[in-house]
């Protein structure tokens, strides 16, 4: 029994150690010259799609058994010989461009993912053929947009265009361009050779021209040197004589200058004494003037301070008086406004009471007339007839009419006398009584008569 337990413990230990060794073996380290691509169940991208692979360079990754696997991409540079023949330039001249390209798998994150998706599992020869096809197409495209002179003379521009276009296309499959080397460019028509001969002839002619110019410059320089020699000797002699004369002149001038300086020194000394005395007197005057100005400024400041203080006090007094008057006016105005308001309110109430009494009286009159408004109106007019007659009599009582004399000359053409025509015209000039009542917004009472048309309609 004891042996069986020991055997069981040893077996479990062996299994655990083997399992741990197997788990540790799944932790894969990526060499520096390779890219480790882990594929299988990787996870999802930011947009929710499944990730095809995970690329690791210069690190390590735990590869989950069963669910994941891994492979390596070699970063060793790949050299590709590209012998492009009969490529058509922009001038429709076919040229041969032999070149060698060096490419390799890129380690940029996005480009490395492209390499994992498009190059994993391919042989080196297959990668070379795929890259060569891309390079051939881009070379032909670039040459078709350039002149032969640009391709042949400006190699930097040509190589920059090739590198830019080719690398852009290579990144799509996960590669990057390391180097481009164009060995030689030739054409079947001999255009490039003719350009070379033209350049050589031009260089030879320029060299010959430079030699002739140098010979000419040498002869001219020799003659100029001899001329300058003679001129310099003559100038040296004249300078020597002139120097002797100037030396003698300087001695005389020096003596004269010495005497002049002594006289000037004496003059300056005398002037300096006078100037110092004048400055002392000037400084004394200036000090007295400054003292006087200071005293005047002090007195002026004192006077201004007194005036300002008095003005401020007066200003404060006036402000207080103005505030008191304003408060008194405000109270007076408020009292008057309250009195006017009370008076107007009393008048309004009185008018309201009068109107109410009148309305009540009118209502009683209409009620007395049996509810007939016309009858009530007739009663009101009958009640006021006496006053109306008094007003009319008062209007004409001062007019004195002693007598009325009418001269009539006989009958007119229509059989009427002149007096009749005068009275008839005067009566027509007076508006009918019914129309006057209507203009006043009233109706003529029925006992004064009605129009014939209205009588007929009522019948």
Image (cartoon, grey):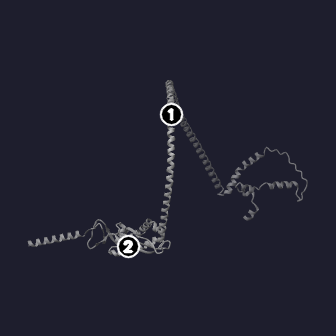
Q: What residue occupies the far right of the structure in this picture? A: 410
Is disc 2 placed on a helix, strand or loop? strand
- Looking at the rendered image, the quarter that the C terminus falls into is bottom right
Q: Which of the two marks, 1 or 2, is nearer to us in this view?
A: 1
Residue receiving disc 2: 81
Crowdedness near tag 1: few (<14), some (14–19) or many (≥20) residues, C-alpha within 10 Å: few
Residue 425 % position (x, y): 83, 55
Front residue of 252 and 306:
252
**Disc ID at residue 228:** none
Answer yes or no: is residue 290 visible.
no
Crowdedness near tag 2: few (<14), some (14–19) or many (≥20) residues, C-alpha within 10 Å: few
Residue 258 % position (x, y): 49, 29
Q: How far apart are marks 1 and 2 (CA)?
A: 91 Å
206 w.r.t. 302: above or below = below
Nearer the N terminus, badge 1 or badge 2? 2
Residue 240 % position (x, y): 49, 39
Residue receiving disc 1: 248
Residue 372 appears left or right of 108: right
């Amino acid at each position: 029994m004891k042996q069986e337990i020991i055997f069981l413990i040893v077996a479990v230990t062996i299994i655990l150690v083997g399992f741990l060794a197997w788990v540790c073996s799944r932790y894969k380290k990526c060499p520096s010259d390779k890219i480790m691509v882990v594929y299988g169940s990787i996870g999802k991208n930011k947009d929710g799609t499944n990730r095809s692979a995970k690329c690791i360079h210069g690190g390590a990754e735990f590869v989950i058994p069963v669910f994941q696997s891994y492979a390596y991409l070699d970063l060793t540079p790949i050299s590709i010989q590209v012998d492009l023949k009969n490529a058509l330039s922009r001038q429709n001249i076919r040229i041969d461009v032999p070149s060698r390209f060096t490419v390799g798998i890129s380690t940029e994150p996005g480009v490395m993912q492209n390499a994992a998706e498009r190059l994993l599992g391919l042989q080196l020869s297959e990668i070379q053929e795929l890259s060569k096809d891309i390079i051939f197409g881009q070379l032909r495209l670039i040459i078709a947009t350039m002149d032969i002179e640009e391709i042949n003379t400006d190699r930097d521009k040509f190589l920059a265009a090739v590198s830019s276009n080719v690398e852009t296309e290579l990144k799509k499959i996960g590669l990057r361009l390391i180097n481009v080397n164009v060995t030689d460019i030739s054409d079947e028509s001999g255009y490039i050779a003719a350009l070379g001969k033209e350049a050589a002839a031009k260089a030879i002619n320029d060299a010959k021209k430079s030699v002739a110019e140098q010979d000419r410059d040498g002869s001219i320089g020799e003659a100029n040197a001899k001329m300058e020699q003679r001129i310099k000797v003559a100038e040296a002699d004249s300078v020597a004589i002139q120097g002797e004369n100037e030396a003698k002149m300087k001695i005389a001038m020096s003596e004269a200058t010495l005497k002049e300086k002594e006289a000037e020194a004496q003059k300056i000394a005398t002037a300096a004494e006078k100037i110092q005395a004048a400055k002392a007197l000037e400084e004394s005057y200036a000090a007295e003037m400054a003292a006087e100005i200071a005293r005047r400024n002090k007195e002026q400041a004192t006077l201004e301070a007194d005036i300002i203080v008095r003005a401020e006090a007066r200003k404060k007094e006036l402000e207080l008086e103005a505030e008191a008057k304003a408060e008194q006016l405000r109270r007076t105005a408020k009292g008057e406004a309250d009195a006017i308001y009370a008076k107007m309110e009393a008048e309004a109430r009185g008018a309201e009471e009068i109107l109410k009494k009148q309305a009540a009286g009118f209502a009683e009159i209409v009620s007395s007339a049996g509810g007939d408004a016309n009858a009530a109106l007739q009663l009101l007019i009958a009640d006021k007839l006496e006053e109306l007659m008094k007003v009319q009599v008062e209007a004409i009582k001062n007019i004195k009419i002693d007598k009325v004399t009418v001269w009539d000359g006989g009958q007119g053409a229509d059989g009427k006398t002149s007096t009749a025509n005068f009275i008839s015209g005067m009566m027509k000039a007076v508006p009918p009584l019914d129309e006057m009542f209507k203009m006043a917004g009233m109706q003529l009472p029925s006992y004064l008569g009605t129009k014939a048309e209205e009588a007929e309609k009522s019948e």
